[in-house]
Amino acid sequence: MTHLDLLLLVALINLPVAWWLAGGATRRRLLALPYGLMLGMLLYMDPGATWDSGLSWVFLGQSLSWRLDGLGWFFALPTIGAALAAAAYSSGEWGEDFAGAGGSMGWLQLALAANVFAMLVLLAAGDLLTLFIGWELVSWAGLPLMVLAGGAAVGAGIRYITYAMGGGMAVLLGVVLVYVWTGSLVPADFMAVLPTLASWQVGLLVALFFGGFGVKMALLPFHLWQAPAYGLSVGPAAAFLGAISSRMGLFAMALVLVKFITLERLVDLTVIPGLLDSRDVLAWVAAFTIILPTYTALKQNDARLLLAWHGIGQGGYMVLGLVMGDAMGSAGGLLHVFNYATNQAVLLLAVFAVMHRTGTADLNRMGGLIVRMPLSFLALLIGIIGLAGLPPMNGFVSKWLVYRSLVLEGEPLLFLAAIIGTLGTILSVYKLIHNIFLGQLRVEHEDIREAPWSMTGPMLVLCAVIVVTGTMPGLVLGVVADAQQAIGLAVPDYHLGGVTSPAGGLDMLWLNGVIMAGFAVGAVLFYGFGGRTKRVHQLDNYAGGHFLTADVRYQYSDNFYPGLMHHIGGWYRGSFQWLEGALISVVDLLATALRGFYHQAQPAAWVLFTITLGFAWAVLP
């Protein structure tokens, strides 16, 4: 039994173990232990090596095989890490309250364990059939995590699985066409025959795989399912799903489109002669995915949905960097997977900690909680700086690499799109932290206290990871380089503090040192030469030289950014909302048709008939 087999075996055994541990308050303290073991096993495995499985099964005449290379190792790291944080978060007071309110901790932990196992099966796929089986396992494993909250979350989960089934069918058809046209599902055989395929054949494969994997990534126009499906899930489930689940789509794109089909072949596929190739199309899909969901997040008043919409937009940066294909761009796109996972996990855990104490995620019903929940404030502050892509946090490094790539590759319009997306992120995350923690404290929250250590502990550990990898990004760039080499991409000249390049490098050790020195000077001036401050109770306030007492509301959280909305509101309602409404109508129509289809007396016969027709079309000349 190989090291990979042991890792998969531990992940599989964790399914019944997680169920059993969730069954008692004392046993729940150990929920994070299996994920800690898996993380240790993964760190023992060299990410620069290829780890083969000793298992080999035959299914439908095809051999199923597993092997973990640098790309799969890199994606496995945030997968297990996010599960570890989610399990630790739910092991104490949060889990007790969830179970006390009628929630099923057993199903929650079982679903979390099932997601980790399914993702590892996918990340270690050694051929296209195994890849498809892992893809479907990941798609269906996510559904229980989404619907456990009940209510609106059930409808969001049903919408998700509708999208997932459509994406899965596109991937399946792509796999079938590969077998028909090449006679094999082994990657080496596929890559050997690929140069002999006609442009329309390769173009069809690109469209099917990019569309199928793009559904999981929630790329436009397949993005409408993700925000409610992730945001309305219960706390730890939302953090895990938001951090890593949709990034399985990026893994599959990197493997199939970049490694198997190659970016060079994508450039050769002309869409508009002399103007646009298929790689350009993928890049512009990513650019629009950065902008539109990010500005949709700006309008959200539910903290969970605001962050979930940002999850869609941040995925655009990952795809954009990956398809640029150069050393810096692809490093930035892949590095952003890790950086975003740490930022989004800590942000959602902080938001759910606030919900745990206040009972609401409505940004218009909070304010001033900084003095009641200072650790949660610190976690949210570090998370939003990282999510916005600002120094000194790790999100700045990955976004800088993408920006630099776009400039060096001569893509000014894509660079502008990336900057516009960052501006929208900064505006909306400021709204998030202001409305929750700043401003005037509400009377009903006067007795609020900080979340317990079982919840703040995982948040602070993630904060430490964000700060350390922001100051020393070379710690992660090493495994990013292994992932790049695994899919045949160039590697940047990296060091502990960042990257070196003749066109301009980045050293976060130096940059963060300057920033910290600036803060130190400010602290000396404020505390050493200030002294003209007066503390004001959070139920009171101060503005314009006057003290405002608790009977005067001085909180402008409601209708945030009214001036901006005045200028863009008409365009937003007249175009983007109309487009979203049209897509929602189409999805609802398809859902109604599918519901009626499956209510037929012989649904299995109809499914078999439809699949047979599809396969016949693919096989027959």
Image (cartoon, rainbow, N blue to C red):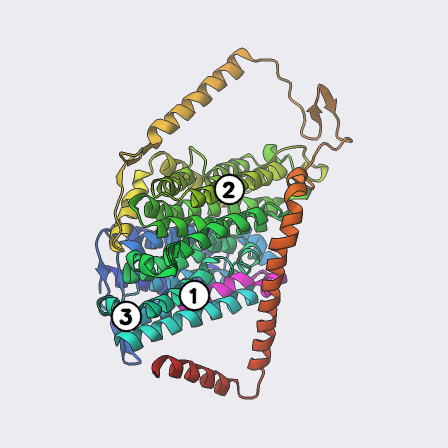
Magenta residues, start to end: 135-156
| Residue closer to the observer: 427 or 452 | 427
How many numbered marks are there?
3
To which residue does mark 1 refer? 212
Percent across and percent down for residue 103 are 58, 60
**Residue 16 seen in the current view:** no
Q: CA distance from mark 3 to mark 1?
A: 21 Å
Instruction: Say few, some or many: other residues with alpha carbon within 10 Å of mark 2 (under 14 / 14 to 19 / 20 or more).
Output: some
Q: Considering only vertical position in the picture, is 230 above or below 164?
A: above
| Residue closer to the observer: 277 or 468 | 277
* Prevailing secondary structure of the magenta residues: helix
Identify residue type, mark 1.
Gly
To which residue does mark 3 refer? 197
Identify residue type, mark 2.
Ile
Which residue does the image show at 51% across and 65% down from the upper left? 144
Q: CA distance from mark 2 to mark 1?
A: 27 Å
Percent across and percent down for residue 599 are 58, 82
Does the magenta portion include 151?
Answer: yes
Q: Considering only vertical position in the picture, is 156 above or below 292?
A: below
Which residue does the image show at 39% across and 74% down from the upper left? 173
Instruction: Say few, some or many: other residues with alpha carbon within 10 Å of mark 1 (under 14 / 14 to 19 / 20 or more).
Output: many
Q: CA distance from mark 3 to mark 2?
A: 39 Å
Q: Which mark is residue 420?
A: 2
- For the residue labelled by badge 2, is the local secondary structure a helix, a strand or a loop? helix
Percent across and percent down for residue 255 are 32, 60
- Asked whether, in this view, residue 207 is left or right of residue 544, the answer is left
| Residue closer to the observer: 193 or 252 | 193
Going from N to C along the chain, the mark reached first, 2 or 1, is 1
Q: Which mark is residue 458?
A: none
Percent across and percent down for residue 139 are 45, 66
